[in-house]
Image (cartoon, rainbow, N blue to C red):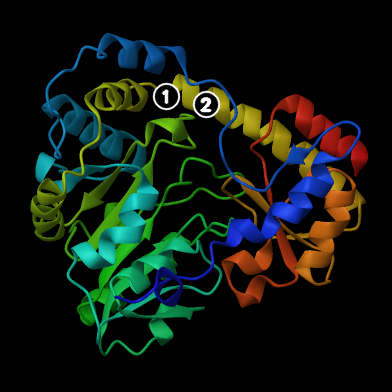
Amino acid sequence: MSAVSDRLPTFPWDKLEPYKKTAAAHPDGIVDLSVGTPVDPVPELVQKALIDAADSPGYPTVWGTPALRDAICGWLERRLGAREVTHRHVLPVVGSKELVAWLPTQLGLGPGDRVAYPRLAYPTYEVGARLARAGYETYDDPRDLDPAGLKLLWLNSPSNPTGQVLGKDELTEIVAWARAHGVLVVSDECYLELGWEADPVSVLHPDVNGGSYDGIVAVHSLSKRSNLAGYRAAFIAGDPAVLGPLLEIRKHGGMMTSAPTQAAVVAALGDDAHVHEQRARYAARREALRSALLSHGFRIEHSEASLYLWATRDEPCWTTVAHLADLGVLVAPGDFYGPAGDTFVRVALTATDERIAAAVARL
């Protein structure tokens, strides 16, 4: 058996620990803008739904309750413009990271197969390919890839880390290209409800997919929109020919969302008010941080959506990380997301208003 270190890259966040200690030594404490973990309260109606379902002694099902599937289908139609979505088109998952990491394995990919993902990307796309022992590569435009042996094409719009959004026409062309070559498209859309200077569109929209879900799957999470990162609540939606076998595999693996969490998701997907309230919080924090970074000599690229600002001072990213750590502000180095990010840092909006104000004052 090969060592884990032979199969997987070094866990990137461990490299940030010395800078975290430096930032924590600031007299007014650290402002941690490195990890995009929510800090605001879980909406009360979601907490109530969780509590009301606390007496759940039996095993939940992998496919979820009919009420959960109804809630997902309704949200897909109401929010994303998807059409004719049935229970066969949806599948709850135990947080989106778990799905990303294990999807290539659950799809049966292995040596000789290829997985592709954006040149600047969430590191777990690579991890998933490695766990399956499949080949992997990055792209600027997926239509330039050699389709031979390409089995899984990851899209990520809005992007983590850059906040870049793929437009409707570009998505339509990519889906058509993938279908022509028999490549499964899986679109990570976890930040779709956080568009600022763009209105992100899902691959599930009929203008993109032509009214067919063949060969496409979208990934959605409640971690950011509803502050439910601690609940591990997410789902995928799309081609029943893909989701059906995944459901059977995940049954064997016992990959079940807890019953109280399922009830909480039903409540969260049925309410838009808390999403608008959270968006307003993030919008204010984004504007404050954006202005402070620009005045401090940074340039911000993309960042038209998501929970991050993709910022640079045109110097090595670790130099920037060290500079900000000296000010008590911790950010993520851009090279965590690929060599193309080696002069950028990712600045998360996920800190309290008080800590954001502290960062602004220091900058």
Label 1 Cα crowd, 10 Å radius (few <14 / some 14-19 / many 20+) = few
- In the picture, measured across the screen, residue 197 lies left or right of residue 65, that is right
Q: To which residue does mark 1 refer? A: 272
Residue at x 58%, y 62% (from the top left corner)? 12
- Viewer-closest of 157 and 152: 152
Q: In which quarter of the image is the N terminus?
A: bottom left
Q: Which percent across, then down, holds residue 285?
A: 72, 34
- In the picture, measured across the screen, residue 84 lies left or right of residue 105, that is left
Mark 1 element type: loop
Label 2 is placed on what type of residue? Answer: His
The circle drawn on residue 276 is 2
| Relative height, residue 23 to residue 357 (above, below) | below
Does the image show residue 184?
Answer: yes
Q: Which percent across, then down, holds residue 352?
A: 69, 28
Does the image show residue 203?
Answer: no
Residue at x 33%, y 28% (from the top left corner)? 269
- Viewer-closest of 312 and 106: 106
Residue at x 20%, y 38% (from the top left corner)? 256
- Viewer-closest of 316 and 158: 316
Label 1 is placed on what type of residue? Answer: Asp
Mark 2 element type: helix
Q: Quadrant of the C terminus?
A: top right
Q: Which percent across, then down, holds residue 235?
A: 28, 43
Circles 1 and 2, Cβ within 8 Å, touching? The answer is yes
- In the picture, measured across the screen, residue 42 lies left or right of residue 68, that is right
Label 2 Cα crowd, 10 Å radius (few <14 / some 14-19 / many 20+) = some
| Relative height, residue 119 to residue 96 (above, below) | below
Residue at x 18%, y 17% (from the top left corner)? 56
Query: Rounded to the nearest whole Å, what is the CA distance between mark 1 and mark 2?
Result: 6 Å
| Relative height, residue 333 to residue 49 (above, below) | below
The circle drawn on residue 182 is none
